[in-house]
Image: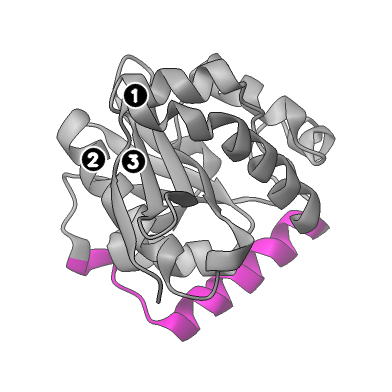
Amino acid sequence: MPNIKVRVATPSDCQFAQSICLQMEESAKARGTGIAKRTVDYIQKQMNSGKAIIAIDVSKNEIAGFCYIESWGHQKYAANSGLIVFPDYRKMGLAGKIKEHAFKLSRKKFPAAKLFGLTTSLAVMKINSKIGYHPVTYSELTDDEQFWKGCQSCVNYEILQSKERKNCLCTAMLFDPKVKKSKWKITRGAIYERWKRLKFLKLTK
């Protein structure tokens, strides 16, 4: 693996904001899904406020991956968003390392908040489960309208609306700091079976 350092982003990393936005868009297109679109200014704001994780190939001073955190519902909830790994650095386990750093940063910034995420990726589900997240219904997520407005840029937004925001193609996952991690520990096979059941139910309802 290249000499990659994963750390909290700083103002000096704002030079990579444009590349991050472009890669987010390309990754969403490749998956056939949408993500909450963010501007260069917004990404730079997260960096300047210490609410982002960046992975840098120090031998090339080149960005390898990125993730940022947001809070919702008066800091009762927090989410790790915009996780990307650039093409040359994939299949190295880098996504997991970035998520772990983002999780620790979220816990430091918002220690009492419930951490949540929405994903269509089985790989991300496995990473989240390892950290301590577990699948939940949408009713357990934040009701902050600003968060849900972010879904408007997703190709599946009409499905979310038709389901009255009760479910969609994404799987909801939650980490509750009041619940012990061991209670929600599930195996890789269990994650996959749960994922299949949830997708089947969402597509048939």
Is-magenta flag for residue 188? yes
Q: CA distance from mark 2 to mark 1?
A: 17 Å
Of discs 3 and 2, which sits in the foreground? 2
Q: Are marks 3 and 2 in contact (CB under 8 Å)?
A: no
Is residue 111 in sight in this rendering? no
- The residue to which callout 3 is attached is 115
Sequence-first disc among 1 and 3: 1
Secondary structure state at the residue bearing disc 3: strand
Position in image of residue 35 (x %, y %): 67, 38
Quadrant in which residue 128 is drawn = bottom left
Secondary structure state at the residue bearing disc 2: helix
Secondary structure state at the residue bearing disc 1: helix
Classified by dominant secondary structure, the portion drawn in magenta counts as helix
The quarter in which the N terminus is drawn is bottom left
Q: CA distance from mark 1 to mark 3?
A: 25 Å
- The residue to which callout 2 is attached is 105
Label 1: how many Cα within 10 Å (few below 14, some 14–19, many 20+): few
Q: Are marks 1 and 3 in contact (CB under 8 Å)?
A: no
State left or right for residue 70 relative to residue 76.
Answer: right
Label 2: how many Cα within 10 Å (few below 14, some 14–19, many 20+): many
Q: CA distance from mark 3 to mark 2?
A: 11 Å
Position in image of residue 192 (x %, y %): 55, 77
Magenta segment boundaries in residue numbering: 182-203
Specify the amino acid type for callout 2: Leu
- The residue to which callout 1 is attached is 11
Residue in view at x 53 percent, y 75 percent: 91
